[in-house]
């Protein structure tokens, strides 16, 4: 369908809740969304597409046709949306990559040599299933802790077939396994320890500890001191395990805290699990920068709890979900537990959300390299200025003191980085007195006259001009370009009272704040500082040179050639002033050397 046809079809939709399914020309689902009023929501996609974000425009350009499913209520639409996203995994929906849910630990005591294994979900096979404990890493930790505590095997050998075959593995030598493969321990002892493992998985730490303590005392009474010592070590391990188990059991969480953080190119969704005020575990998802962070977090929250199959007592959010009450109703229906979803405004809960968001930001930073950050910053800068991301930026500044030695600098940034080989500096010509506006006009015009002429070193056209100063400076730069029939985006760099660029301003006076976007603020500040540094350095060089030469002009017998010789030999005016007469006579005739020496050694005078 054409955009017009899609728009016409959208206008025929009912003002009813439901779900819309966008498909491409291959009939593949590329986006699923929910709406309170289908007609209004779907029509928005095909009206005023210029106002859409780049990602939304791209998605709309791929839509060939769409379907809708009218729902009886908003709640029914929410449930349907979640189900269809999970079913189709549409390209333009923000998706959880790990939607497998939490794993369980399986133990079948009917086996001759039972083993603890990790599985995705319980099965109706007569085995015992324990958990879920949280993420796969947490579940692995629980299984490993129990194995080491009871010195159970963790190898690929199959018992009883592999008993008494081969040497024991490294775990035996590390005292992490009792060496069951050697066949010296009985099946009864193996099953006893597996029963203790089952009791630990059920949380019966005290019962297991009491049983081991009883065995230890019995061994001691029978003077089996080595066995008693081993049982004592196992008892200590069980008692310490109970503490660890409580801390790592992620599914014991009564509070989940959602965090969100983003860099220039990546975003992160984080869930911190708390129980009784203690942090148990962290899970996170990295994805590309979304058009709407609130919509992204809302979508991920839904997917997270649907795929995990559980609901805590409360979920703390960084910002309000539009349909949080509906989703809480959904979780109560699914899991039989009422969950409160809310955005804390103060106190300990707010601190937890801030902690979760800090974790999210750190994960996003960790996975965003320098090149991506620069690219993302340029994308953001282009969006803020309503231009294409600028690959080449040129910045101009004027430097003078009391109208003397007026100079200008032009620094170049390519792909967000200094490009010093393209830097240029100009001496302002034909101006008497200080006139920054006339100076800026002259310098910008001279730079682009070279461009028009195709002169080497000036033949690249920038994507953006940044002018040190406000709206008037930007205006004179614009006039210079107009005189040459050139069009290039121009912005003045407006400083705050701490001499930092707080905003960019158009020649018409429209200000665009940048101090609320840290990456852009840092980039523009870097450009402004570099432009000023390059200008002031050139100005100081010219002024120093002029002062050096004017001082030597006052000495009889010292012309241009002898000035050069003196500066070459003694490096500076200070060096010449400190030279002895014999040193001066080595490069000058005696009368000229004496004139120089006497000039700098007149009683009561200093020359610098």
Image (spheres, rainbow, N blue to C red):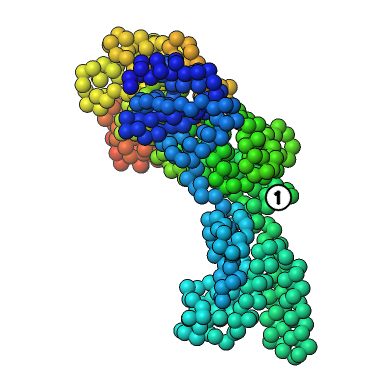
- Is 494 displayed left or right of 61 in the figure? right
How many neighbours does mark 1 have within 10 angstroms: few (below 14), some (14-19), or many (20 or more)?
some
Foreground pick, 329 / 201: 329
Give the residue at x 40% y 26%: 66
Considering only vertical position in the picture, is 505 above or below 194? Answer: above
Res 124 quadrant in image:
bottom right
- Of residues 434 and 306, which is closer to you in this image? 306
Q: Position of residue 78 (x, y in %)?
A: 56, 32
The percent position of residue 331, horizontal first and vertical second, equals 63, 40
Residue 319 in the figure: left or right of residue 164: right
Q: Residue at x 74, y 86 (%)?
A: 219
Q: Which residue is mark 1?
A: 275
Query: Which quadrant holds the C terminus?
Result: top left
Q: Is residue 124 above or below residue 481?
A: below
- Secondary structure, mark 1, is strand
Q: Is residue 122 above or below residue 16?
A: below
The number of discs equals: 1
- Which residue is at a point 35% across and 26% down the rendered structure image? 64
Specify whether 261 is left or right of 450: right
Residue 44 image offset from top left, x and y in percent: 46, 19
Q: Is residue 236 left or right of residue 37?
A: right
Seen at 36% across and 38% down, the residue is: 571
**Could one spot residue 248 in this view of the protein?**
yes
Image position, residue 211 (x, y; %): 74, 75
Viewer can see residue 512: no
Looking at the image, the residue that sits furthest to the bottom is 223
User: Dividing the picture into quarters, in which one does residue 129 lie?
Assistant: bottom right
Quarter of the rendering occupied by the N terminus: top left
């Amino acid at each position: 369908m054409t955009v017009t046809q899609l728009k016409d079809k959208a206008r025929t939709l009912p003002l009813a809740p439901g779900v819309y399914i966008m498909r491409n020309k291959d009939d593949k689902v590329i986006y699923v969304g929910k709406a309170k009023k289908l007609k209004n929501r779907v029509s928005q996609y095909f009206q005023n597409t210029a106002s859409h974000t780049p990602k939304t425009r791209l998605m709309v350009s791929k839509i060939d046709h769409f379907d809708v499913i009218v729902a009886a209520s908003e709640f029914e639409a929410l449930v349907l949306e979640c189900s269809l996203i999970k079913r189709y995994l549409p390209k333009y929906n923000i998706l959880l990559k790990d939607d497998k849910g939490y794993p369980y630990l399986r133990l079948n005591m009917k086996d001759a040599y039972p083993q603890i294994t990790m599985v995705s979900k319980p099965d109706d096979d007569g085995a015992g299933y324990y958990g879920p404990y949280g993420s796969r890493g947490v579940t692995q930790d629980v299984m490993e802790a129990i194995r080491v505590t009871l010195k159970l095997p963790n190898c690929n050998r199959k018992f009883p077939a592999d008993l008494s075959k081969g040497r024991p593995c490294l775990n035996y030598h590390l005292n992490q396994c009792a060496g069951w493969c050697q066949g010296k321990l009985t099946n009864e002892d193996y099953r006893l320890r597996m029963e203790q493992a089952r009791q630990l998985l059920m949380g019966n730490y005290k019962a297991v500890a009491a049983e081991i303590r009883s065995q230890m005392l019995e061994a001691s009474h029978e003077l089996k001191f080595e066995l008693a010592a081993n049982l004592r070590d196992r008892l200590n391990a069980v008692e310490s395990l109970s503490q660890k188990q409580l801390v790592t059991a992620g599914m014991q969480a009564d509070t989940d805290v959602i965090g969100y953080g983003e860099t220039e190119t990546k975003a992160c969704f984080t869930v911190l699990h708390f129980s009784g005020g203690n942090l148990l575990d962290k899970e996170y998802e990295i994805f590309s920068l979304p058009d709407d962070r609130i919509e992204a977090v809302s979508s991920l929250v839904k997917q997270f709890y649907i795929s995990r199959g559980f609901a805590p007592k409360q979920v703390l959010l960084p910002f309000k979900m539009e349909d949080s009450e509906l989703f809480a109703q959904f979780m109560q229906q699914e899991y039989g537990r009422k969950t409160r979803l809310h955005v804390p405004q103060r106190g300990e809960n707010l601190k937890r959300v801030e902690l979760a968001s800090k974790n999210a930001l750190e994960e996003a930073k960790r996975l965003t390299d320098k090149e991506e950050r620069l690219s993302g910053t340029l994308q953001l800068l282009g969006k803020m200025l309503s231009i294409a991301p600028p690959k080449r930026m040129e910045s101009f500044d004027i430097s003078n003191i009391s109208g003397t030695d007026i100079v200008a600098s032009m620094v170049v940034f390519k792909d967000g980085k200094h490009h010093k080989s393209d830097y240029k500096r100009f001496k302002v010509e034909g101006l008497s007195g200080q006139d920054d506006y006339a100076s800026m006009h002259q310098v910008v015009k001279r730079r682009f006259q070279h461009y028009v002429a195709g002169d080497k070193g000036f033949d690249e056209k920038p994507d953006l001009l940044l002018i040190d100063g406000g709206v008037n400076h930007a205006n004179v730069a614009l006039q210079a370009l107009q005189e040459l029939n050139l069009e290039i985006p121009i912005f003045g760099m407006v400083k705050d009272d701490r001499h930092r660029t707080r905003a960019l301003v158009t020649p018409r006076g429209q200000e665009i704040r940048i101090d609320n976007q840290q990456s852009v603020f840092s980039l523009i500040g870097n450009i402004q500082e570099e432009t000023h540094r390059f200008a002031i350095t050139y100005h100081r060089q010219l002024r120093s040179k002029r002062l050096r030469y004017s001082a030597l002009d006052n000495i009889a017998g010292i012309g241009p050639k002898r000035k050069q010789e003196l500066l070459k030999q003694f490096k500076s005016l200070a060096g010449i002033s400190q030279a002895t007469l014999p040193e001066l006579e080595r490069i000058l005739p005696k009368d000229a050397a004496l004139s120089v020496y006497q000039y700098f050694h007149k009683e009561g005078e200093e020359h610098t």
